[in-house]
């Protein structure tokens, strides 16, 4: 069950990130996804926070493409993408997930952290869900599910764990979009 959910979510992730729809994931797809998120947050394309996010997506792509053996300017098929994410992200546990996903999550926190405390409040989280097109009615329950220490703020670590749990089929909050 968990494996099926995981594969299904990875396939959806692949399809979503294959922005130009050519059946392969390449750097331009990641750059396009970064631009989409930046625009959805209403952020200026050249702001420092926007550049941090774009960089995080490029670094994530280059890391996975390197491990997949296609090189930083290569492209990955669904099979290569699934294999490399399985090996580098899921099989290496929290460390793998943090290494690959954390810079991107941190960059998104940078886009919605309007009070600049490095964490995500209820209000800031609303902005996040709005940007990825999740129903505002789901915000409170999602926030509470992610806020594992219950202090009313979401840290980068709590958010990274939530993305991991979503892809493991243990949590139903699609922080990077469905
Ligand atoms: Ca593509
Ligand atoms: Ca904040
Ligand atoms: Ca917390």
Image: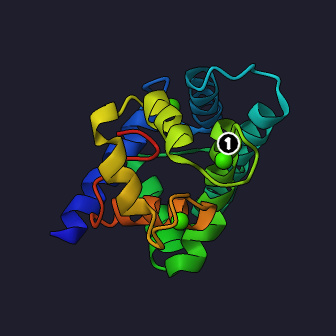
The image shows residue 21, relative to residue 97, as above or below, that is above
- Quadrant the C terminus occupies: top left
Q: Residue 111: give x, y in percent of width and height.
A: 68, 37
Residue in the foreground of this view, choosing between 115 and 39: 115
How many numbered marks, from 0 up? Answer: 1
Q: Residue 141: give x, y in percent of width and height.
A: 30, 52
Q: Residue at x 45, y 68 (%)?
A: 150
Q: Residue 169: give x, y in percent of width and height.
A: 27, 63
**Is residue 71 visible to us here?**
no
Residue in the foreground of this view, choosing between 18 and 103: 103
Residue 116 figure quarter: top right
Residue in the foreground of this view, choosing between 7 and 124: 124
Q: Secondary structure at mark 1?
A: loop
Query: For the residue with label 1, is its CB less than 8 Å from the closest atom of ligand 2?
Result: yes
**Is residue 5 visible to us here?**
yes
Residue beneath label 1, please?
A: 113
């Amino acid at each position: 069950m968990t494996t099926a959910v995981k594969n299904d979510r990875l396939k959806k992730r692949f399809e979503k990130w294959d922005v130009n729809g050519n059946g392969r994931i390449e750097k331009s797809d990641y750059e396009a996804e970064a631009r989409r998120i930046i625009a959805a947050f209403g952020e200026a394309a050249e702001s420092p926070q926007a550049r941090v996010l774009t960089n995080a997506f490029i670094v994530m792509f280059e890391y996975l493409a390197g491990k997949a053996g296609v090189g930083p300017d290569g492209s990955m098929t669904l099979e290569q993408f699934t294999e490399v994410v399985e090996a580098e992200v899921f099989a290496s546990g929290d460390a793998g997930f943090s290494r690959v996903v954390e810079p991107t999550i941190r960059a998104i926190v940078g886009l919605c952290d309007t009070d600049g405390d490095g964490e995500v409040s209820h209000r800031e989280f609303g902005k996040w869900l709005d940007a990825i097109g999740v129903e505002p009615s789901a915000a409170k329950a999602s926030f509470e599910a992610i806020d594992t220490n219950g202090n009313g703020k979401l840290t980068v670590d709590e958010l990274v764990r939530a993305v991991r749990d979503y892809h493991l089929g243990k949590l139903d909050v699609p922080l990077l979009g469905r």
